[in-house]
Amino acid sequence: MGRGMKAGKKPGAGGGGSSMQKQLQQLQQVQRRMEQMQAELDEKEVETTAGGGAVSVTVSGKKEIKKITLKPEVVDPDDVEMLEDLIMVAVNEGLRQVEEMSQSEMGKLTGGLAIPGLM
């Protein structure tokens, strides 16, 4: 039972380990780049408007509302529903744009691969 058996190597098995190690290193690099990209995305902001600019909403890359600006003429006590609708439209558009931005940036990194648990 020579030394080859003691080492646990089979013929042709030597290349598989280094290939697996390279893949693991590549995945770790992708993970680090994704973390960096996510941090950069978190710092970005998008601004959306509704009602011809009567309502403006700023949303962070973390999907947090940072600012809502209302023009005085849109504040009508007799039509609160319109103001609510305009705010909802602007907020939803901001969230949609942040999601689109995030998917676009992550897609550049992963090359469009669907990797479970990353998105």
Image (spheres, helix red, strand yellow):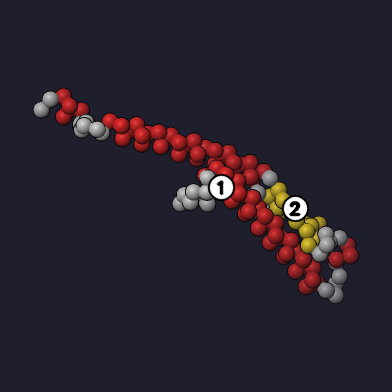
Question: At which x and y percent is residue 88?
Answer: 72, 65
Quarter of the image with the N terminus is top left
Residue pictured at 73% horizontal, 64% vertical: 89
Q: Look at the numbered disc 1 and give the secondary structure of its residue.
A: helix
Percent x, y of residue 102: 61, 49
Q: From the viewer's perspective, is 87 left or right of 9?
A: right
* Foreground label between 2 and 1: 1
As helix, strand or loop, the secondary structure at mark 2 comes to strand
Asked where in the image residue 23 lies, by quadrant, the reply is top left
Cα–Cα span, label 2 and label 1: 22 Å
Are the residues tagged 2 and 1 within 8 Å (C-beta)?
Answer: no
**Kind of residue sitting beneath label 1:** Gly
Please give the residue where the numbered disc 2 appears in the rendered image. 47
Of the residues shown, which amino acid type is indicated by label 2? Glu
Q: Is residue 109 visible?
A: yes
Vertical relation: 111 (above or below) 8: below
Instruction: Using a 10 Å C-alpha cutoff, classify the residue at mark 1 as few (fewer than 14 neighbours), some (14 to 19) or many (20 or more).
Output: some
- Which residue carries the number 1 mark? 107
Residue 78, x across and y down, in percent: 85, 75
The local crowd at label 2, few if under 14, some if 14 to 19, many if 20 or more residues have their Cα within 10 Å, is: many
Count of marks placed on residues: 2
Q: Which of the 4 quarters of the picture holds residue 35? A: top right
Q: Nearer the viewer, residue 73 or 49?
A: 49
In the rendered view, would you say 14 is above or below 42? above
- Residue at x 89% of width, y 65% of height: 73
Depth check, front residue: 82 or 31: 31
Dot 2 or dot 1: first in sequence order is 2
22 relative to 60 in the view: left or right: left
